[in-house]
Image (spheres, rainbow, N blue to C red):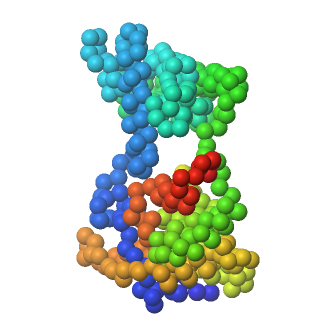
Amino acid sequence: MGTMADAAMPRSARGRGSGCLTGGEGGAAGSRITSDGQSASWQQSKKNVKNIVDVFLRTTDTRKELAGAPGGPSTMDSITAEQACNKQLYEEFAGYLANEYRCTQGKNKGNYLKMGPAVCYFNNLALQLSNKFKHVSDTTRLFFTCKEKQGSSDEWVWFNGVRSNMKGIIHERAARLGEQTNASAPPIYPSDVDKMVAALSKEGSMHSAVVKFALLTTLLTGGRPCEPQYLSLQGMSDDDEFNVTQGESSQIKTTKTKIWSIAPASQSHRSWHLALGDYLSLVERESVECEKDEFGEDVPDALWLIPELQLVECPGTWLTNAIKALLPQDRGGSVR
């Protein structure tokens, strides 16, 4: 049983990584990694919550007093350790999210928050304040037991009760107005992917080969687009007994590893192996090189399966935009 890396190496067909796994420019040894979330989506989520909290704290005089010194600016950054343990702050914020806040952009602009985003913002406020203040004193340490996954303290019961009541208000309003409570995008099924692969194959460009291969890899490994970003040929192999290509994949959200396998397809538009052949034939690759670490040792670049995904900030957004580009221009009806 040979590895996929062995099969591909004679083509000198792998591109260089971008250092995304190391958290530092160029992947230099000793790069600093903090305990906070590293992903761009997490950083953006923090900014969104901060902006919403800053607006919330300016809505009434009572809320202004929940953050900062009297007469000073009331923002999320001005919240003190003592104020972060004030239950009224979270109760007022939950009421604001459920009954007052309206989306300012996107397809839900002008509408109340759906349940998922509201819960995310509520949790995020508590999480950011917990990370900032939970070790300040015994008081803050006890209060932020409310953020434990399986807690039993009075603070944990209170926090989950507030969140549950907020969800109940949002659900009741959605049911009364006949609105959907699920904010997820419409699903894309394998039959939809077949049509996309057919269109990309007809177009036949280098870009189409990359998109087609990334699309089928995402589908057949059962992952998010950010997971094929870190698939390496070094961890893949062909199983001669079951005639499948197999490997391991790290699940970004759960930090757990899963095993995947891809069998030969019964039709060409579902064939990952055919898409791989098109990809290797049409896409020009750079040679694999080695860099010196701080000890002078050669460190080879990773043999990424799809190194193009290392060059984009968010593979999910990149793949979504590539899918949207397949839509006919100036056509009415669903954007799906």
Q: Which image quadrant for residue 167?
A: top right
Q: In screen coordinates, is 255 left or right of 300?
A: right
Q: Which image quadrant for residue 164?
A: top right
Residue 333, horizontal then vertical, whole percent:
63, 47
Q: Nearer the viewer, residue 27 or 177?
A: 177
Q: In screen coordinates, is 201 left or right of 210?
A: right
Q: Is residue 257 above or below residue 146?
A: below
Q: Is residue 249 visible?
A: no
**Image quarter of the N terminus:** bottom right
- At 45% from the left edge and 18% from the top edge, which residue is drawn? 89
The furthest residue to the bottom: 10
Q: Is residue 276 above or below residue 147?
A: below
Q: In screen coordinates, is 300 left or right of 256?
A: left
Q: In screen coordinates, is 267 left or right of 215?
A: right
The furthest residue to the front: 330
Q: State the count of labels.
A: 0
Q: Nearer the viewer, residue 111 or 140?
A: 111
Residue 22, horizontal then vertical, whole percent:
37, 61
Q: Nearer the viewer, residue 156 or 212?
A: 212
- At 51% from the left edge and 19% from the top edge, which residue is drawn? 100
Q: Nearer the viewer, residue 36 or 317?
A: 317
Q: Is residue 247 visible?
A: yes
Residue 317, horizontal then vertical, whole percent:
48, 54
- At 55% from the left edge and 61% from the top edge, which residue is drawn? 326
Residue 137, horizontal then vertical, whole percent:
38, 25
- At 39% from the left edge and 23% from the top edge, which residue is drawn? 55
